[in-house]
Image: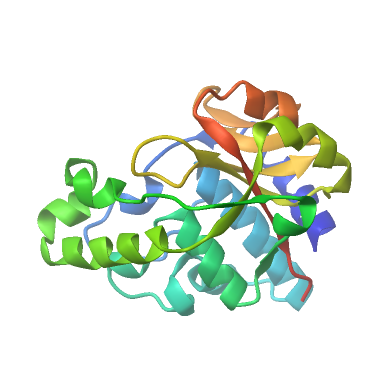
């Protein structure tokens, strides 16, 4: 499935980077937008289209179903708090659902914990939390749970030595030192380079080699690597 993901992903090159496409409506909906992508929806769409192809499911509604399955806790669309907002929870839940496996430890990754509280401490950035105060405690509970979990990270200095063990289509998650946050960015590996939707370049592109790209990110601690599971 990694090969299919990477082939789909490159077709998105030069697609416009647009943030916030999932938050334009007051009621939570399964938005699937293939013309405006941020880093998460780029990876999500590439992964979900590949899963549809492997299942021989070719209707748009099939893609929506796949997006719901990966984007929402236990694959169930509910209110705003059922979306897997934090990448760390996306990892945990999509391992549980059999979508991906975390190969970071096997690559020599180091145990790491995050202190996660950004959303509950910055509700001014989240209209859904401002308009639905009852969601805030739910988010806090999720943050507290995630802060107790252990993840694996390949630190910056070790990335170059593991690139040869990675595959095109592997999901690359960038762990950050930013306060209250777990991961700051996500992309895919392609020809040992970072293929991602870039807020800097305002489009999807094949960027620098992975190790060079990470070294250039001052707040990046390192990476967690997920490998999509073949169906």
Residue 228 appears at what percent x and percent y? 72, 63
Please name whichever residue, 178 or 53, is drawn nearer the observer in this view of the structure: 178
Is 196 situated above or below 141? above
Quadrant of residue 198 in the image? top right
Q: Position of residue 131 (x, y in %)?
A: 11, 56
- Residue sitting at x 65%, y 76%: 98
Image coordinates of residue 59 in percent, x first then y, are: 63, 72
Name the image quarter holding the C terminus: bottom right
Picture quadrant of residue 217: top right
**225 relative position to 21: left or right:** right
Residue 32 visible in the picture: no
Judge by depth and name the residue closer to the eye, 36 or 43: 43
Judged left or right of residue 37, residue 83 is left
Is residue 8 among what the camera can see? yes
Residue drawn at point x = 70 percent, y = 54 percent: 104
- Residue furthest toward the front? 111
The image quarter in which residue 25 lies: bottom left
Q: Is residue 96 left or right of residue 27?
A: right
Please provide percent x and percent y for residue 84. Answer: 42, 63
């Amino acid at each position: 499935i990694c090969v299919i993901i990477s082939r789909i992903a490159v077709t998105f090159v030069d697609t416009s980077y647009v943030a916030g496409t999932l938050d334009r409506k007051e009621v939570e909906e399964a938005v699937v937008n293939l013309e405006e992508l941020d880093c998460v929806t780029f990876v999500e769409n590439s992964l979900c289209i590949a899963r549809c192809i492997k299942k021989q499911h070719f209707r748009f509604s099939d893609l929506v179903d796949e997006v719901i399955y990966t984007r929402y806790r236990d694959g169930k669309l509910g209110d705003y708090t059922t979306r897997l907002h934090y990448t760390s929870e996306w990892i945990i839940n999509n391992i549980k659902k059999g979508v991906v496996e975390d190969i970071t430890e096997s690559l020599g990754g180091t145990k790491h914990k995050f202190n996660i509280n950004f959303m509950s401490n910055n509700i001014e950035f989240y209209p859904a939390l401002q308009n639905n105060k009852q969601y805030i405690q739910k988010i806090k509970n999720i943050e507290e749970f995630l802060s107790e979990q252990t993840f694996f990270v390949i630190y910056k200095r070790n990335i170059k030595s593991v690139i040869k063990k990675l595959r095109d289509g592997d999901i690359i998650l960038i762990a950050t030192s930013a306060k209250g946050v777990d991961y700051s960015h996500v992309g895919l590996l392609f020809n040992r380079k970072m293929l991602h939707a870039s807020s800097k370049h305002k489009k999807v592109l094949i960027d620098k080699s992975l190790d060079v790209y990470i070294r250039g990110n001052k707040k990046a601690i390192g990476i967690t690597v997920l490998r999509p599971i073949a169906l």
